[in-house]
């Protein structure tokens, strides 16, 4: 193994499919320090939570509203949770400050913009 070979850290065993996909997509491209690996583990856990919430929401028929405590229409609690977990995932990915990739999949020499972080999260979320 040469000095330029990337060491692939194994995913934490508790991660499910979405979390493992996010983990692999990052560690196969970037070399992270222990603190960044911890942030990535949290982000991967958020990806799993988002996938589970999406599955449950789909099972319920993707309702947008629910009845509140006084029978008023309110945003469905799963919609609110999805929004919160997606925000957390975006923040965690942003905290990693991963450099965007150039056309040859090599990290660029600048930090990712918020838009690029969002695109990375969306690509992961939709399996692209």
Image (tube, rainbow, N blue to C red):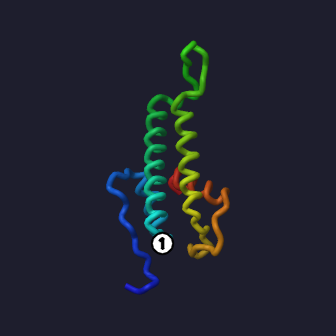
Give the answer, above or below, for where 127 lies relative to 77.
below
Horizontal placement of 102 versus 85: left or right? right
Residue at point 41%, 86% (across, down) = 2
**Closer to us: 22 or 69:** 69
Indicate the secondary structure of the residue bearing disc 1: loop
* Percent of width and height locating residue 23: 44, 60
Residue at point 32%, 56% (across, down) = 13
Horizontal placement of 32 versus 75: left or right? left
Give the answer, above or below, for where 31 lies relative to 5.
above
* Percent of width and height locating residue 72: 60, 16
Quadrant that contains the N terminus: bottom left
Residue at point 58%, 76% (across, down) = 104
* Percent of width and height locating residue 111: 64, 67
* Numbered disc total: 1
* Image quadrant in which you'd find residue 37: bottom left
* Image quadrant in which you'd find residue 64: top right
Per the image, the residue denoted by label 1 is 31
Furthest toward the bottom, the residue is 2
Give the class, few, some or many, for how many residues have Cα within 10 Å of label 1's Cα (few <14, many ≥20): some
* Percent of width and height locating residue 41: 43, 56
């Amino acid at each position: 193994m040469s000095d330029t070979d990337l060491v692939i850290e194994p995913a934490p065993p508790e991660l499910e499919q979405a979390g493992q996909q996010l983990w692999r997509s990052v560690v196969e491209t970037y070399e992270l320090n222990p603190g960044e690996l911890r942030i990535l583990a949290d982000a991967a856990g958020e990806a799993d939570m988002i996938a589970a919430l999406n599955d449950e929401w789909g099972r319920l028929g993707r309702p947008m509203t629910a009845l509140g405590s006084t029978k008023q229409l309110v945003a469905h609690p799963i919609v609110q949770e999805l929004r919160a977990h997606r925000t957390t995932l975006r923040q965690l990915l942003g905290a990693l400050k991963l450099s965007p990739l150039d056309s040859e999949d090599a990290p660029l020499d600048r930090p990712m913009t918020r838009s690029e972080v969002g695109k990375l999260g969306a690509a992961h979320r939709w399996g692209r």
